[in-house]
Amino acid sequence: MKTRFGFNQLCYSGLSILLLLLLVVSHASAGTPSGKGKPNRSGPAHKDSVERPREKVAQTFAAISPGIRGVLSMKAKGELIKMEVDLKQSTILDKKLLPLRISLEPAETSEAAYQALPRRFHVLPDTEAYTIAARDSSGKPVEVKEIRDTFSLAMGYPKYIKPELAKNLRVSVLSDNRWLPLPSRYDASRRMVVTESARQFGTYQLIAKADVVDQEIIAYPNPVQFGEFGGIRRTLKFLNVPLGAVIEIYTVTGDKIREIEAKVSPVAWDGEKGDGELVTSGLYIYRVQMPSEEAFGKIAVLR
């Protein structure tokens, strides 16, 4: 009986010690400073933040090598615009850089760059500036010095631009906050303007040489419906207006309702009169005053 009692007492004592240890450990865990417990709680959350898809730097990209044409497509104002990049065989000295990951995204450009457009050059509506960049096969940005030769760049243009106008388009590169037109040719079959003189990855845009188009100042779209639709405010644009010219808008009875100085090209009119009210539907006359001449036209406004 003593042996049995001693054994039972030993079991009870061991169980009590075990329970006491568990209580001590539990208490110690509850009393741990909050900073100590953060790794376990924040670990999964941190993992989620890393794995969450990052915001895209570019809208579209293509992997290209010499002899393989990179085609990049992007929607601009509801229309699919394509660009193509061709690398020459001798372009990349270090073959470890290949294939290049060419990216394309809309560019943020300053108003000063458009004010400084070369004489007789204009920007057409719905043509955008795009930045083209490159990364190597490991994802590292490629510097200009790593590209020895030029590469070919083809830029698509909106469908409203007719062949006779497209022939006057030039690929231009933004250099020192000024647009520099590059030697370009018109490819009617692909509806693209091509240059063999793209010397670096940078910001490019199509601009129109006005040796033909400036014979006529164009108001586009015409007829026009002013106002805000779907959060977008519609405007009318005057094409081929020389910088510094003054656009005057009149009613058909000869009352001048608005005057706009051409500080950028094209010149936009939001449909407001000089007092800030929106014009009503009807026919309006515009006069463009230039240093040596003036031009007239009609605008049909719908409501």
Image: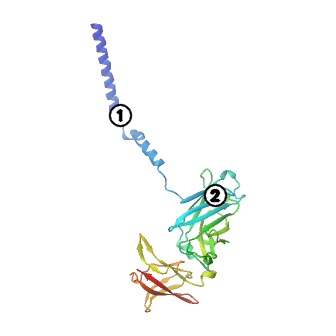
Which one is closest to the eye, mark 2 or mark 1? 2
Q: Residue at x 30, y 8 (%)?
A: 3
Residue 2 in which image quadrant = top left
In this view, 52 is above or below 261:
above
In this view, 79 is above or below 295:
above
Q: x%, y% of residue 26?
A: 33, 31
- In the image shown, does 33 or 274 lie closer to the viewer? 274
Name the element at disc 1.
helix
- In the image shown, does 58 or 69 lie closer to the viewer? 69
282 vs 3, left or right, is: right
The image's mark for residue 111 is none
Q: x%, y% of residue 172?
A: 62, 70
Q: x%, y% of residue 90?
A: 72, 58
Most distant residue in the bottom direction: 253
Name the element at disc 2.
loop
Residue type at mark 2 is Glu
The image's mark for residue 29 is 1
Residue 83 in which image quadrant = bottom right
Q: Which residue is mark 2?
A: 143
Residue type at mark 1 is Ser
Q: x%, y% of residue 69?
A: 65, 60
Residue count near mark 1 (Cα–Cα under 10 Å), binned few <14, some 14–19, many ≥20: few
